[in-house]
Image (cartoon, helix red, strand yellow):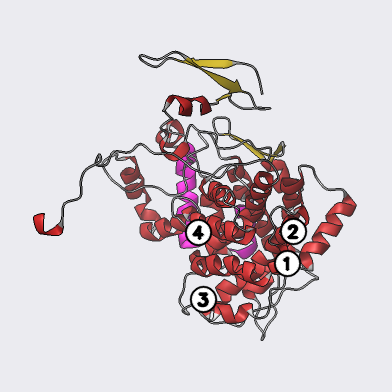
Amino acid sequence: MSDKKATLTLEGKDAIELPIYSGSIGPDVIDVGALTSQGMFTYDPGFVSTAACESQITYIDGGKGILLHRGYPIEQLANESDFLETCWLLWNGELPTKEEKEAFVDNVTMHTMVHDQMNNFFRGFRRDAHPMAILCGVVGALSAFYHDSLDITNEKHRNISAIRLIAKMPTLAAMAYKYSVGQPFIYPRNDLNYAENFLHMMFSTPCEEHKISPTLADAMDKIFVLHADHEQNASTSTVRLTGSTGANPFACISAGIAALWGPSHGGANEAVLTMLDEIGDVSRIDEFVARAKDKNDPFRLMGFGHRVYKNFDPRAKVMKETADKVLAELGLEDDPSLAIAKRLEQIALEDPYFIEKKLYPNVDFYSGIILKAMGIPTSMFTVIFALGRTPGWIAHWNEMIGNPYKIGRPRQLYTGSAQRDFVPLDKR
């Protein structure tokens, strides 16, 4: 914070002084709250120039390609930490001690099972329901099973709900997949780590235990870490806005899942695979690249560039290295659609058009390739994104609830009809 001020001059009115606040890093912000008393407010579609909250969790500098969680670079967390340790960091502000981490991992592991009556809830969905539709419903329904931890003013209740959410998300996500393909649900195992357990519940059957590759488990863990939080994006803002009403945490996370489902947000890596299928063959790449460069053609290359990052997505480098390891492990370097992806990657990194416009491959491009190679259907891509983003959603929700806050209430620029009198039906 600082004592700097900005002055706003409005025609016919006295100048208004607006406080300027400074964060620990990043640009200063102007507090425009004083405009309300003057009968005015700001207009900012998409809230692209508005800070709706103060937060200590995640910092992004899109121009420099920087992503920090509690001050730690995402590259270091992805390569040297793991998902549950990153989860602890997001929630508590510091890395855990060895004892704290062991206790936290044990606590999460002991809560991975879901209530057996949840099986009946799943049966209410059509057999061909999209896994994201199922996940929205079952996560919101957790509030019907855990009445003992819904007092959001109670810190202990908030912590219990957080543990339950992070522990049960892989189980519910895998159940959504199993239900969509007509296979029996697989229970979690306490001897597996977080990523291993998810792969076990996804791919094991009562007939055969799935052999979990350490390379693939590590890749899945990295995908979770790289998606753990991303500041005030659409789904996180939805969780905060929902939470500002006093809604329980399960409802808030369900709202975040619904927001993430949009193709402009969490569906981007699914769109990458759809694009690769549309291209179809390496011989057609030049045709589609030419279309992408044509401003009059609506076709877009998915997985390139990012709304926030005007430089290289810092998560993409880690994902690229992971993708190379996964493809080598599975012997899929010559897979047709993956060959298209590799060629597109080469063009994006070498073609002057892409370099000038900074359309570098982003995290969605590489995560889509990895998930496809692992045999995960595209309908599950956003579900996995939601699983990975859950600790970030919880961290932001808990940060807001643990401090003084106001119910969210954006304003609008009204352009409809002015006041007018009602006309009876027989006179219209």
- Find the magenta span and give its range: 322-350
Of the numbered discs 4 and 3, the one sitting upstream in the chain is 3
* 12 displayed left or right of 313: left
| Vertical placement of residue 191 versus 404, above or below | below
Q: Any mark on residue 157, and which?
A: 2
Q: Any mark on residue 148, and which?
A: 1
**Could you say whether the residue bearing mark 1 is in a helix, strand or loop?**
helix
Answer with the quarter of the image where residue 412 lies: top left
Q: Any mark on residue 258, and which?
A: 4
Task: Report, in whole angstroms, how far the alpha carbon at label 3 lies from the one at label 2.
Answer: 33 Å
Seen from the viewer's position, the closer of residues 381 and 132 is: 132
Give the label, 4 or 1, closer to the camera: 1
Task: Report, in whole angstroms, how far the alpha carbon at label 3 lies from the one at label 1.
Answer: 31 Å
Which amino acid type is marked by label 4? Answer: Ala
Where does label 3 land, which residue? Answer: 180
Answer with the quarter of the image where residue 95 lies: top right
Of the numbered discs 3 and 1, the one sitting upstream in the chain is 1
Give the label, 4 or 2, closer to the camera: 2
Task: Report, in whole angstroms, how far the alpha carbon at label 1 lies from the one at label 2.
Answer: 8 Å
**Could you say whether the residue bearing mark 4 is in a helix, strand or loop?**
helix
Q: Residues within 10 Å of mark 2 (few under 14, many from 20)?
A: some
Seen from the viewer's position, the closer of residues 127 and 20 is: 20
| Residue ranking furthest to the right | 99
Specify the quadrant that holds the N terminus.
Answer: top right
Of the numbered discs 1 and 2, the one sitting upstream in the chain is 1
Q: Is residue 342 magenta?
A: yes
Task: Report, in whole angstroms, how far the alpha carbon at label 4 lies from the one at label 1.
Answer: 25 Å
